[in-house]
Amino acid sequence: MTTAHDQDALDDQTRRLVGALHGRVLEIGAGNGENFDILASGIDWVGLEPNPKRLDELAYEADRNGHSTPPLNAKAENIPLPDASVDAVLGTLVLCSVTDTDRVLAEVERVLKPGGSFVFVEHVGAPPRTWRRVAQRIAAPFMKLAAGGCDPVRDTESRIRASRLAVTEMEHYDLPGTLGVSVPFIAGRAVKPVESVTPPGSAQPV
């Protein structure tokens, strides 16, 4: 695994991963549509956003970028899509603030077609027993209040690796943070195995 140390490297990796997505792409925690600039043209985009205050702007940006499907107001813990219905799932800076990371990853695996990709870009908890970890724990209560429930200590990498998805690539980055404490990030892709059988879910067509 490669470790890089600058924002440019993470940005390049994000553009490469996101730009390669094709077919029907579900974006969880789509926010205000920040990824439209790097998503490939011609994809069938479906957006999921739990914050109702963001829906109007997200819908406007989606339409402006040629995506006719209105975004869904729903949480990633309960994705209102049928099993095996999307070619890819995209999540950027999402897993840090969900209520149940394992449930979200199970839902991602459920809605992906066999062989489909989950592309993720996340900041993660620093290694245990380090000053960075201590700093993250001190900052955690403030970040949860100010950043929509974001948990800077969450060990997202281990949860992704423990899921039913197979990690095919993952890069590690250290970005500058406040008070000189760097923030660890990961960016990569995990794939739903072709032989994977998803337990029946409460599928709802869109």
Image (cartoon, rainbow, N blue to C red):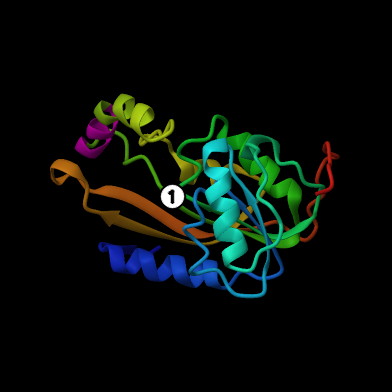
For the residue pair 73 and 17, the one nearer the viewer reads as 73
**In x, y percent, where is residue 192?**
70, 56
Q: Can residue 4 be seen? A: yes
Most frequent secondary structure within the magenta stretch: helix
The quadrant of the image that shows the N terminus is bottom left
What is the count of numbered marks? 1
For the residue pair 186 and 147, the one nearer the viewer reads as 147
Q: Is residue 43 above or below residue 76?
A: below
At label 1, the amino acid type is: Glu
For the residue pair 94 and 54, the one nearer the viewer reads as 54
* Horizontal arrangement in the rendering, residue 111 relative to residue 90 (left or right): right
Q: Which residue is drawn at 75% across and 41% down?
A: 80
Disc 1: which residue: 122
For residue 77, which quarter of the picture? top right
Q: Which residue is drawn at 23% across and 37% down?
A: 130
Q: Is residue 164 magenta?
A: no
Q: Can residue 51 be seen? A: no
Q: Residues within 10 Å of mark 1 (few under 14, many from 20)?
A: some
**In x, y percent, where is residue 55?**
58, 44
Mark 1 secondary-structure assignment: strand
For residue 14, which quarter of the picture? bottom left
Magenta range is 131-137
Q: Which residue is drawn at 39% across and 44% down?
A: 124
* Horizontal arrangement in the rendering, residue 123 relative to residue 61 (left or right): left
Q: In this view, does 102 lie above or below 119?
A: above
Q: Give the farthest residue toward the top.
A: 141
**In x, y percent, where is residue 150?**
41, 35
**In x, y percent, where is residue 97?**
47, 36
